[in-house]
């Protein structure tokens, strides 16, 4: 009809976990491909494992193309929360065979990549800066706190927020946006009370309006240890008790009623002993907010709506 404007509802995001464990299992470490629903233009949130995860995803029917196409064409860039090997080693190992891509990170993370990884000693310098010759395949894109940056070759943008990962070491939270829908991804982080910072609260304050309006489609947050882990041995991580205490902070800002059925992806569980089973039970018992807890599996695609 003439004079009519058609408005298409957005449909959230799709996620393909390439790695979900918080250490030990070197073929299954933190990495999540994220794209708007229906899109093949993904960003990879951390990159501890890449190839093994893509192969698992292809085998599970998450993609109808081969693994090489997923690596070279579907992944448009990497968002790296911090430079620990369990969050970056897959990207480094695959960089020789990868295509030109952007690597988004905050200043400290980029400095570590330049000095210690892509330096011609640990690995060839396939980036655009650092020890010569710089081969210019990966292009560093420095993120600044709270400043939105478009992710090239995709329809999404990102804002970064600093986290404390056992002071003085830092990590990052990424708020990913497509249209008026959002996903929040936390890299490794300790609770504010233990880390003696307000980093988590500042992130919660930034996203509370999105929770109230229903625009935040999901949160990725780590739980590395069961509740029995002493606070002095958290090493910049969360337990189920601290995980839920942090969501109580968000509830105080956004209203408890708005957190019910919020998609929360539980990441970075350390697969030692019966940790995984214990953490699931402890989270379930403490979930008084009615969060929709999602325990991702390597290569198994899911949606956040």
Image: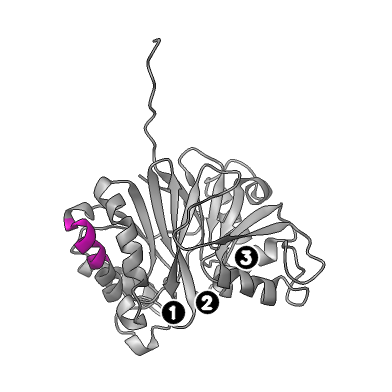
Image quadrant in which the C terminus is located: top left
Proximity of marks 1 and 2: CB atoms separated by less than 8 Å:
yes
Residue 11 rendering spot, x and y as whole percentages: 39, 38
Observer-nearest residue: 89 or 52? 89
Q: Looking at the image, is 11 positioned above or below residue 141?
A: above
Which label's residue is closer to the chain start, 2 or 3? 2
Mark 2, mark 3: which one is toward the viewer? 3
| Residue 22 visible (yes or no) | no
Q: CA distance from mark 2 to mark 3?
A: 14 Å
- Residue count near mark 2 (Cα–Cα under 10 Å), binned few <14, some 14–19, many ≥20: few
- Residue range of the region highlighted in magenta in the rendering: 247-256
- The residue under label 1 is 272
| Helix, strand or loop status at disc 2 | loop
| Helix, strand or loop status at disc 3 | helix
Q: Give residue 293's quadrant in the image.
A: bottom left
Q: CA distance from mark 1 to mark 2?
A: 8 Å
Q: How many marks?
A: 3
- The residue under label 3 is 90
| Helix, strand or loop status at disc 1 | loop
- Residue count near mark 3 (Cα–Cα under 10 Å), binned few <14, some 14–19, many ≥20: many
- Residue count near mark 1 (Cα–Cα under 10 Å), binned few <14, some 14–19, many ≥20: few
At horizontal 34% and vertical 58% (from top left) the residue drawn is: 206
Q: Looking at the image, is 114 positioned above or below residue 296?
A: below
Which label's residue is closer to the chain start, 3 or 1? 3
Residue 153 rendering spot, x and y as whole percentages: 60, 44
Which label's residue is closer to the chain start, 1 or 2? 2
- The residue under label 2 is 24
Q: CA distance from mark 3 to mark 1?
A: 21 Å
């Amino acid at each position: 009809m003439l004079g009519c404007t058609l408005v298409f509802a957005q449909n959230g995001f799709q996620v393909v976990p390439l790695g979900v464990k918080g250490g030990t299992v070197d073929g299954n470490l933190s990495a999540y491909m994220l794209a708007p629903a229906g899109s093949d233009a993904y960003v990879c949130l951390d990159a501890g494992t890449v190839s093994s995860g893509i192969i698992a995803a292809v085998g599970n029917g998450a993609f109808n193309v081969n693994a090489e196409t997923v690596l070279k064409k579907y992944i448009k860039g990497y968002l790296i929360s911090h430079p620990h090997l369990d969050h970056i080693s897959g990207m480094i190992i695959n960089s020789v065979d990868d295509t030109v891509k952007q690597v988004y990170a905050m200043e400290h993370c980029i400095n570590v990549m330049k000095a210690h990884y892509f330096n011609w000693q640990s690995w060839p310098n396939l980036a655009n800066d650092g020890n010569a010759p710089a081969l210019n395949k990966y292009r560093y894109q420095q993120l600044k706190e709270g400043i939105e940056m478009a992710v090239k070759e995709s329809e999404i943008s990102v804002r970064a927020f600093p986290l404390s990962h056992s002071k003085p070491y830092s990590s990052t939270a990424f708020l990913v946006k497509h249209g008026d829908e959002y996903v929040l991804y936390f890299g490794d982080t300790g609770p504010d009370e233990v880390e003696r910072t307000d980093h988590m609260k500042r992130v919660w304050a930034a996203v509370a309006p999105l929770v109230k309006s229903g625009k935040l489609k999901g949160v990725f947050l780590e739980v590395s240890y069961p509740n029995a882990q002493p606070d002095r041995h958290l090493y910049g991580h969360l337990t189920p008790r601290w995980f839920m205490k942090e969501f109580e902070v968000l509830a105080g800002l956004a209203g408890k009623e708005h957190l019910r059925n919020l998609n929360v992806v539980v990441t970075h569980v350390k697969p030692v002993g019966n940790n995984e089973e214990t953490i699931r039970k402890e989270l379930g018992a403490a979930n008084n907010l009615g969060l929709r807890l999602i325990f991702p599996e390597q290569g198994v695609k899911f949606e956040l709506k």
